[in-house]
Amino acid sequence: MGSISGKTRWVRAVGTPAAAIGLAGMIVFGVGVADAANGDNLVIGHANRASATTTLKDSKGTPLSLVAPKGKAPLHVSNTTEVPRLNSALVGGLAAGQLQRRVSGSCGLGIASVRSGGSAACAPGVVVHAAPGSYPYTVPSNVHELRVFLVGGGGGGGANTAPSQVGVNGGQGALLEALLPVTSGEQLTVTVGDGGIADDGATHGSTSGGATQVVNASTAAVLLKATGGGGGGDLASGCIGNSVAAGGEPHVFTGIGLWGQLGQLGGCDTGGGAPGFAGTGGGGSTADPATAGNAGVAELEPVG
């Protein structure tokens, strides 16, 4: 198979003359420095120089196999420049099938998954409705619980009917925060209550604010509800009397109530109902007409 002469060991190929010449011209075990790419021998275990690309070909099998002791890298490169088309079964201990491709697109609240084409499927975000009306809501995939915040509409303000009478503010809508258990794909209807109509002092009195609620669209069952505040009256002569509009009430029919508050009562002054929430009642007035109540708010956020 080979011979040993002094400190230099030559590997001699067995087979055709062409194979012998090719292998002997490539591998030499010993000392020295050679220019392998320029036709000289490649010296294993020593530094080698090349001024052109060295190509290794094998028409019948793997042209190069590197074996190193356990815990030692079989290959080392001098810098971090990417090596084109260098494949590996494991990268950082992960198989190629476990690696995620480059993602295209962006998401405000995080990525839920990556589609086969590489585009991002965004995590479901918070849905807020602040205008009166009904809105369909489909529970997103892999979501089993919603955090829901509701505010009922504020009651309309009462107007004066005589110079000595001052209208009463409408009551504030209820506030409710709860965790609602749901199933992926479940259809819900979210209704935001409108503010109550103000008393015009002549043809009609004030009205209560509308309820803000979440309903199961299939069964029509009310799951969560924040009722609206009561409409303000106009019988508080000189701001003395019992015509004070009621506040709304929170109701949890399904889920876990986290926080709730009765809507504050309407009062006898020219401002709106207790400030701080969208469901503020309309203000009473010493001059017709009074102001209407503000609409409620509904906020839904997937949490689990």
Image (cartoon, helix red, strand yellow):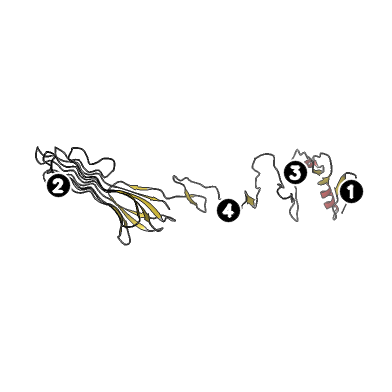
Residue marked by disc 4: 98
State the SS at label 2: loop
- Does label 2 or label 4 sit earlier along the sequence? 4
Comparing 180 with 240, the one in front is: 240
Picture mark count: 4
- The residue located at (84%, 43%) in the rendering is 30
Q: CA distance from mark 3 to mark 1?
A: 27 Å
Q: Which residue is disc 2 drawn over?
A: 205
Amino acid type at image mark 3: Thr
Task: Kindly report which numbered mark, 3 or 2, lies closer to the viewer in this rendering.
Answer: 2
Q: In this view of the protein, which residue sits in the foreground, 72 or 274?
A: 274
Mark 3 or mark 1: name the one nearer the start of the chain: 1
Q: CA distance from mark 3 to mark 2?
A: 95 Å
Q: Amino acid type of disc 4? A: Gln
**In the rendered structure, which disc, 2 or 1, sits on the residue that comes first in sequence?**
1
Q: Are marks 2 and 4 in contact (CB under 8 Å)?
A: no
Q: Is residue 144 left or right of residue 214?
A: right
